Amino acid sequence: MTAKTTAAGVPYDVQGEMSDSERRDAAMRGFVREFGAVAAAHLESCVRCGMCAEACHFYISTGEPAYTPINKLQPFEQAYHRHAGPFAPIYRLLGIVPSVTIETLEEWERLIFDACTLCGRCTLACPMGIDIADLIKKARHGMFKAGLVPDRLQLMDRTARAWGSPATPADDFADIIRDTGEQFGVTMNIDLEKADYLLTVAPAELTDHTKALADAAKVFNKAGLSWTYHTEGFEASNIGYLNGDIDLQETMTRKIIDTAVRIGAHTLVLPECGHAYGAARWEAGRWYGDKLPVRIIHMTEFLQEVVASRKIKLNRVGQSASFHDPCQLVRRGGVMQAPRDVLKALGFEIKELENHGALSWCCGGGGGVVSNSRADPIRYKAFELKQREVDAAGADRFVTACGQCRITLTLGAKHFKWDRKVENLLELVADNLAD
Ligand code: SF4
Ligand code: SF4
């Protein structure tokens, strides 16, 4: 892994031993693999209206034209027209669409990894229905094949391949669960051979935020459900999904789903992690077909279910709260009402942010951006959009339902010395269970 700088002074990282032409060809093969019928239809439809630009937090907060969503797609689109579009042979013959150069790809790394959280706000704005965020995610696959991924993300990828999680070896998982149970005085279930619910985790919960593991167990125990954590399938965050490493994405997806099936679980519960929801709930169909072998829900949906069915009762906090909508859960996943129902059950008056629900501004750290320190300056610029809206809403508490959003927003608050605590919905529920 090596950090380099382009002739224009743009930093990029490079992995593996390939010549420039091999690297470029590997990217092109990766792109072509992703040019299915839907991607092709989208790449043919853009009318260059520019509406997506006004939707992107990185463009809005910096004013930098390079950060417009459509610019982030430029080399991918160029590769499509030269190698896969209906007029590709003519374009190549007449030289109308030139080859994508290695220099372009090196400069592009920063645009699609540092300056895109795959948040989908641009997708929502596009009048032609082009799923720009999904196309950028597809483009990451070619970049992964070419060894042009930020080193921080690539390191997580290698660790996940070796350990089964970017945070900890699978061999340590059961010990972490038992230690956490002892620390917080909660009964933990680990590696049960039969259970109705398989509960999965996100990396930060295995290191800095272990209380979330105990909080989830506390709620399941209180609801009287049959559940377990399991060493064979525990990691839901799926770095392969973010990096364009499709083989790893498939492996990690299969681990949790196949484990759920093997123990007879009817429901696989994802942790408070937005991208875990995108990877497992919406992309698992790539390998399992439309009918998944197990029901897959986010922790927030689970909380809504146990509150609505009165399996748990909550103490009423009696304050006001603003909710930060995690992009993958709310905008792309459509889980808009569930967190609000749970907040209401906790007795909160909800003070919505100016842009909320499907229109919420991204925290600025999704899509692997918060793990990529090279992106810190623009991440902080994007954070200011959220900070202004939270201050304007003036609620007592500020809550989200994604651990990565929480980390990103907490880092932003620390950077700007902003005196706001960011709380997670699961923790609020676990701390306010009524007898
Ligand atoms: S997905 Fe989000 S971050 Fe990426 S270009 Fe679109 S609006 Fe910007
Ligand atoms: S909003 Fe859609 S059609 Fe308009 S420039 Fe962006 S991608 Fe193209």
Image (cartoon, grey):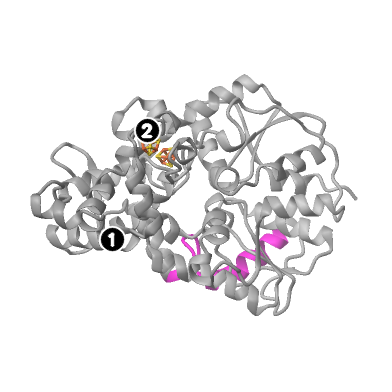
Is 311 a magenta residue? no
Q: Position of residue 184 (x, y in %)?
A: 73, 56
Look at 21% across and 48% down and name the residue there: 106
Can you say whether 395 is above or below 289 in the image?
A: above
For marks 1 and 2, the one nearer the N-term is 1
Horizontally, residue 173 falls left or right of residue 242, namely right
* Magenta stretch, residue numbers: 162-183
User: Which residue is under mark 1?
Assistant: 32
Horizontally, residue 79 falls left or right of residue 130, namely left
Give, as a three-letter code, the residue at label 2: Pro
Q: Position of residue 181 (x, y in %)?
A: 71, 62
Can you say whether 343 is above or below 198 in the image?
A: above
Look at 36% across and 31% down and name the residue there: 49
Give, as a three-letter code, the residue at label 1: Val
Pick the residue in front: 68 or 50. 50
Assign a secondary structure to mark 1. Answer: helix
Residue at the farthest top position: 392
User: Which residue is under mark 2?
Assistant: 377
